Amino acid sequence: MTFLDRLQTEVNRRTFLRRSGYAVGALAAGSLLRPEAMAASNEKWLGVLQPRHHEPKAKRVIWMTMAGGASHLETWDYRPKLAEMHGQPMPESFTKGQQIAQLQGQKLMCFGPQTKFAKFGQCGQEICDYFKETGTVVDEMCVIRSMTTDAINHDPAHMFMNTGSQIAGRPSMGSWALYGLGAEAADLPGFLVLTSLGRGGQNQPIAARQWSSGFLPSKFQGVHLRSKGDPVLYLTNPPGISRELQGDVVSTINSLNAQYDTLVDDPEIATRIAQYEMAFKMQASVPELIDTTNEPAHVFELYGCKSGDGSFASNCLLARRLAERGVRFIQLYHKDWDHHGGVGDGVRLKAEEIDRAQAALIKDLKQRDMLKDTLIVWAGEFGRTPMSQGGNGRDHHNKGFSIWMAGGGIKGGISYGSTDELGYAAVENVVTVHDVHATMLHLLGVDHNRFSYKFQGLDARLSGVEGAQVIKGILA
């Protein structure tokens, strides 16, 4: 006789719920239906690092991914020599024997910057003048102009930036953060992802594997909040199903799962129980979170969005709301940065979509006294070539590109590192993806060398085993 057969013959559902010592789901349902009576039973994941390795500067991360590979040469890294050599052959000394994505074997011509640059802030940071609003907060930012990556095509480059490996199956950085540090929010996942679609580039796809938990338990994977419609699929109860009835179903299923787990001791069953409970909590918390209509008019004016319009600006506002509610890792993807053609006009369109919003996020967090413990990272998966493609575009490039950081222990108003005079390769204070991951963990109070998970007999780390270094020159 199977376990379920025995269960059906020995107890009915209500008797089981009354007598079972494993009614975890019932406690979760009760905590929402009668929170004052059940508060002591409502546990949340606190992380494996208790205490942390050192005092953290940041409590949370907002990572803005410019999917497609933003051109550093039209945004953050002005190269006057490249402008001077526009239309001339690219010196072979730069490119000989180098990996190039789609320009391999073609005649390589220098392609000067297609946007104008200007100096902003007290620090005099020189950035693209399309980013005038960002220029008003540039004194809070550190622009890293010496980034490199190992990958040169979109999907492996996204995997590398998100997980530290080009091969799918490793945990994303958000999953590592949640696993190590736990969640502050009891009614929301600790790792949330929002996506938005832009104009002016190729719409490169992004996939859920970018926010996967990999070999970590699946409860640490990112949860994708959709910008329009139901923020999470199947969040709304079907017609005729009340919240009380849904809670009864959840508690029953979780009690059965808990009893079965005592027989098989499968960690994924415990994860399933936790996910049912979290889903039930999210039915109450997420609609209120996504509904921004209660925000003052001046906030919408600051960000340049309307409530629920699905834009990058709207997602920046949601990121602030998520940060306020204790979400550990928030990742915003904004697509269409793949400018194989029309890079000048493309960057102009992208700046129209993100400039005001990303500046607003920094200002909003600062006035709420949250910027000091919120680490913001702006990055694509790679940069673009200083050589032209198709006459007015740029190919993928991994030898040198730019990202920026702000808040959460970052020294503002500085730049770090440099590419060569043509913007081809990072030559000063070269930074790797693993270095960025190590620095992010450091700011969260984690020694990246001591933070690992046993996988296939090895101690796997987000920062890899290639000698990643914390970027001490950018720390406040």
Image (spheres, rainbow, N blue to C red):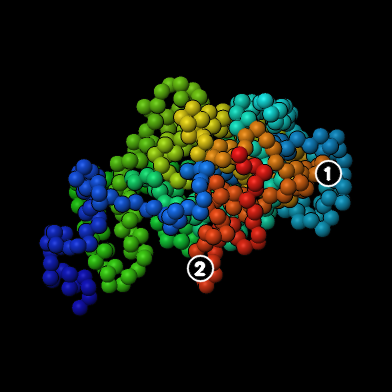
Give the residue type that dot 2 points to: Phe
Residue found at the far bottom of this picture: 1
Up-down relation of residue 145 to residue 20 (above or below): above
Up-down relation of residue 218 to residue 119 (above or below): below
Which residue corresponds to mark 2? 455
Q: Is residue 160 left or right of residue 302?
A: right
Where in the figure is residue 266, as x and y percent of width and height? 35, 68
Circle 2 SS class = strand
- Do the CB atoms of the residues marked 2 and 1 lie less than 8 Å apart? no
Give the residue type that dot 1 points to: Met
Where in the figure is residue 413, as x and y percent of width and height? 65, 32
Q: Is residue 418 visible?
A: yes
72 vs 344, nearest the viewer: 72
76 vs 122, nearest the viewer: 122
- Identify the residue at image location x=25%, y=51%: 41
Q: Is residue 457 left or right of residue 250?
A: right
Which residue corresponds to mark 1? 109
Circle 1 SS class = loop
Q: Residues within 10 Å of mark 1 (few under 14, many from 20)?
A: some
Where in the figure is residue 1, as x and y percent of width and height? 20, 78
Residue 418 in which image quadrant: top right
- Identify the residue at image location x=34%, y=36%: 288
Which mark sits nearer the N-terminus, 2 or 1?
1
Q: Is residue 294 left or right of residue 249?
A: right
- Quadrant where the C terminus sits is top right
Residue 16 in which image quadrant: bottom left
- Identify the residue at image location x=52%, y=43%: 57
Q: Is residue 335 visible?
A: no
Up-down relation of residue 14 to residue 125 (above or below): below
